[in-house]
């Protein structure tokens, strides 16, 4: 059996049915074998970063270990940023790249480099296969490491000559693992005592809640103990219903900001996340003095990594939440009811404030972000999945759209832009029966605009909405923050942060890649255009001119 056969059959044994890739010469063994393995569908991309971004979101949406095939050193280099995003998003993913013939290693061949060393900083494990005898065992280990909690990408370099070598070592096969940890009863009891004693508990729900399918258990616990719920500033999934009265929104990007939001809480339960990804340094702790901090993680590496905790438990998130529910039945139900009532009153006030915000901004031109989100929601189907890279419009998105389950919302982590337009491809491949709405800013979209060609090529009926304010708005906000935080006295303009001269023409870009496109400048046209785009059943791009930084 040749190495390439071992390779393909190992993928099939591990449940791979999609290969996300950008073809190249050193990938010839894989590409030439595809006709022999029709159960493996190749999703072709025009840029390696787009392939990885799509695979990352596919892994999130499908629950499978995503598989990517890239091309030698420049191709891997093109993909590094998106691999970083997958690492931060904890996507289980095996990334491979074709490597030059090892017999030319000392000749410095064209496109040759140490691929394993290039990938190592942004993956959980990085290795080059040195003989066909290693292919099955290395790939078997790669799939295992990628899916071990906390999940993440691994990298395997595949020399072209190794893929053509003969071997008697069979394809790697997956182990049958039962990896869900049951929580330590002593740990649950310690947590329960602190929760019952708390007067103002809150929960920060990380992405692991969604990945564990634990949203319903979280909702039940929240209503039993009367806790509010926050998301981190950056999150990839929706771990709690955003229309629930206990939902409070997203946390700030610096410790003082988080501390201000949690100042009233005497107990914080951290569930399944890195806690916290900050943008700006700020002194102090995010928790008030005397606040009890609890944490549940599916594996040890993140537990008490950034903060000392008063009780920490390693367990399957859903099992831990159910155990906490059983252990806190003796809580003061009168106090719980009062807290839940106060959350309901706060939500009504927040909803009223958002409606007032929308009405105040309704007639502004260019179109305001609150108005855009209201019109998008009106035109989108009820069961729409939102792939989000709105950045500065994110607040209005979450106050307008309601996300019930973990499969309703996907976004990128780590701060690298371009993940949304690329990631929408992967979500569409994983969820072919649900409508997909990808919302991106114009600056972010240009990092992976080649994704439109893949959407057309594979007939993925995604509606891409590009919010065009002709600027890197977030950078303008950040330079304001920089000047304030570092006491820089300046009235200078925002240098190199405007995207005009020439203005980007997204509708024309889309048409050039086979996607129908339109540019809208009037708010009253948005909902109709969005509804028509979904009805077409084809990929479609809508560019909307919106207001810039005010």
Image: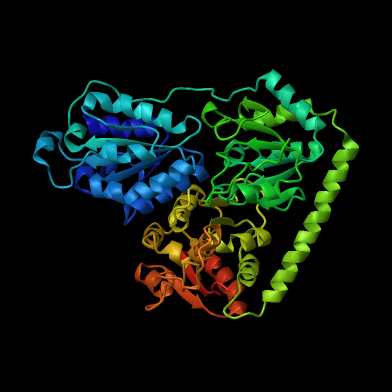
In the image, residue 543 lies at what x, y percent? Answer: 49, 72
Question: Of 396 and 96, which appears nearest the observer?
Answer: 396
* x then y, percent, for residue 279: 52, 51
In the figure, is residue 293 to the left or right of 120?
A: right
Q: Residue furthest right?
A: 334
Would residue 104 be visible to someone looking at this image? yes
Q: Is residue 538 above or below residue 518?
A: above
Q: Quadrant of residue 135?
A: top left
What residue is shown at x 52% (from left), y 49% (from top)?
431
Q: Position of residue 335 (x, y in %)?
A: 88, 39
Front-most of residues 495 and 337: 495
- Name the residue at 32% across, 27% down: 138
For the N terminus, the quadrant is top left
Q: How is the image coloured?
A: rainbow
Question: Residue 257: x percent and y percent?
Answer: 64, 51
Residue visible at 68% across and 22% down?
187
Query: Residue at the spot x=42%, y=28% of the render?
Result: 144
Count of numbered labels shown in the rendering: 0
Relative to 40, say whether 539 is above or below. Answer: below
Instruction: Name the quadrant of the C terminus.
Output: bottom right
Position of 417 with respect to 33 (left or right) is: right
């Amino acid at each position: 059996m040749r190495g390439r056969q071992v390779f393909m059959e190992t993928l099939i044994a591990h449940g791979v049915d999609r290969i996300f890739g950008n073809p190249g010469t050193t990938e010839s063994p894989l590409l030439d074998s595809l006709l022999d393995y029709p159960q493996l569908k190749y999703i072709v991309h025009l840029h390696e970063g787009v392939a990885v971004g799509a695979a990352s979101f596919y892994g999130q949406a499908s629950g499978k270990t995503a598989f990517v095939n890239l091309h030698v050193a420049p191709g891997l280099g093109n993909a590094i940023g998106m691999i970083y995003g997958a690492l931060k998003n904890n996507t289980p993913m095996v990334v491979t790249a074709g490597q030059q013939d090892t017999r030319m290693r000392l000749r410095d061949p064209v496109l040759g480099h140490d691929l394993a060393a290039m990938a190592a900083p942004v993956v959980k494990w990085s290795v080059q296969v040195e003989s066909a005898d290693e292919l099955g065992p290395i790939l078997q280990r790669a799939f295992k490491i990628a899916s071990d909690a906390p999940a993440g990408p691994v990298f395997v370099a595949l020399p072209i000559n190794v893929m053509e070598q003969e071997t008697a070592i069979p394809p790697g096969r997956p182990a049958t693992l039962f990896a869900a940890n049951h929580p330590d009863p002593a740990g649950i009891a310690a947590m329960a005592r602190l929760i019952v004693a708390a007067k103002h508990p809150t929960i920060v729900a990380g992405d692991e809640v969604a990945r564990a399918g634990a949203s319903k258990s979280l909702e039940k616990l929240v209503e039993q103990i009367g806790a509010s719920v926050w998301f981190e500033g950056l999150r990839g999934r929706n771990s709690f219903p955003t229309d629930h009265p206990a939902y409070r929104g997203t946390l700030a990007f610096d410790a003082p900001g988080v501390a201000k939001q949690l100042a009233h809480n005497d107990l914080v339960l951290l569930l399944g996340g890195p806690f916290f990804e900050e943008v700006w340094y700020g002194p102090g702790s995010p928790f008030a003095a005397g606040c009890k901090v609890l944490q549940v993680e599916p594996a040890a590496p993140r537990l008490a990594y950034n903060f000392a905790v008063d009780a920490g438990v390693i367990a399957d998130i859903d099992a831990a939440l159910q155990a906490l529910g059983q252990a806190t039945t003796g809580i003061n139900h009168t106090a719980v009811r009062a807290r839940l009532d106060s959350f309901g009153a706060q939500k009504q006030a927040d909803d009223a404030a958002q409606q007032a915000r929308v009405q105040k901004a309704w007639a502004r031109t260019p179109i305001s972000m609150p108005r855009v989100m209201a019109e998008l929601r009106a035109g989108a189907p009820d069961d729409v999945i939102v792939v989000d890279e709105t950045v500065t419009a994110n607040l209005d998105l979450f106050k307008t759209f309601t996300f019930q389950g973990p499969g309703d919302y996907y976004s990128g982590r780590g701060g690298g832009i371009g993940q949304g337009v690329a990631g929408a491809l992967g979500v569409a491949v994983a969820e072919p029966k649900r409508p997909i709405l990808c919302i991106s800013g114009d600056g972010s979209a240009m990092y992976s605009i080649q994704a439109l060609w893949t959407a057309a090529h594979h007939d993925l009926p995604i509606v891409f909405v590009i919010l065009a304010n002709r600027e890197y708005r977030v950078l303008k906000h950040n330079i304001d923050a920089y000047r304030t935080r570092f006491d820089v006295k300046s009235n200078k303009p925002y240098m190199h942060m405007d995207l005009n001269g020439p203005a980007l023409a997204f509708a024309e870009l889309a048409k050039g890649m086979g996607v129908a496109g339109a540019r809208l400048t009037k708010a009253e046209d948005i909902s109709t255009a969005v509804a028509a785009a979904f009805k077409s059943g084809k990929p479609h791009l809508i560019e909307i001119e919106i207001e810039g930084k005010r």
